[in-house]
Amino acid sequence: MTTTQSTTTLKVIAFQLMEKEYALPVRQVRSIEKLMHITRVPGTSPFVKGVINLRGVVTPIIDLRKRFQLPNETYDDTTRIIIAAIDDLEVGLVVDGANDVLDIPSEAIEPQPEVVGAVEADYITGVAKLEKRLLILLSLEKVLN
């Protein structure tokens, strides 16, 4: 008797925030940009850094550290802006560094852990275990709400 295994994989962009690795599905990521001038917009939420003009498109920029209520850190050469999109809404996410593109087998993904009091837990869809790496899978929809 022959059995066939069907393993689905999730292709993600891995990035860092405060020594932790997070991931977004590749299908939601348009590009990864170096840090550029961000124009402040008065009256926005504290986690909205402002807007950038990226190839003629004005894109709002969200600082994920502030969104997750993590300590501030000065930007450096590894800081990146991940341009992500849901439907027609395009946003930039400021992260400490963008690492690489990974294929995560579906069996390596576990549901969101129960973490009491962690603000960022509200934005997590699951956790992926890849050998010695632990990736936190983000829900872009929840981050933008």
Image (cartoon, rainbow, N blue to C red):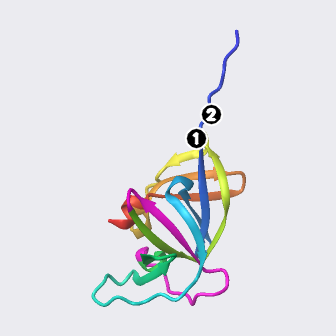
Q: Name the chief secondary structure element in magenta.
A: loop
- Residue at point 57% right, 66% down? 31
Task: Residue 125: give its label.
Answer: none
| Three-letter residue code for mark 2 | Thr
**Magenta-drawn stretch contains 31:** no
Residue position for label 2: 7
| Three-letter residue code for mark 1 | Ser
- Residue at point 55% right, 87% down? 73
User: What segment is highlighted magenta in the picture?
Assistant: 67-88
Residue 27 is situated, as x and y percent measured from the top left of the image, at 52, 53
Residue 99 in view of the camera? yes
- Of the image marks 2 and 1, the number of the one nearer the N terminus: 2
Q: Mark 2 falls on what kind of element?
A: loop
Residue position for label 1: 106
Q: Quadrant of residue 142?
A: bottom left
Q: Are marks 2 and 1 in contact (CB under 8 Å)?
A: yes
Q: Gap in Å between the C-alphas at discs 2 and 1?
A: 7 Å
- Residue at point 30% right, 83% down? 44
User: Looking at this rendering, what residue extends furthest in the left direction?
Assistant: 43
Residue 123 is situated, as x and y percent measured from the top left of the image, at 41, 62
Q: Quadrant of the N terminus?
A: top right
* In this picture, residue 44 sits left or right of residue 52: left
User: Looking at this rendering, what residue extends furthest in the top direction?
Assistant: 1
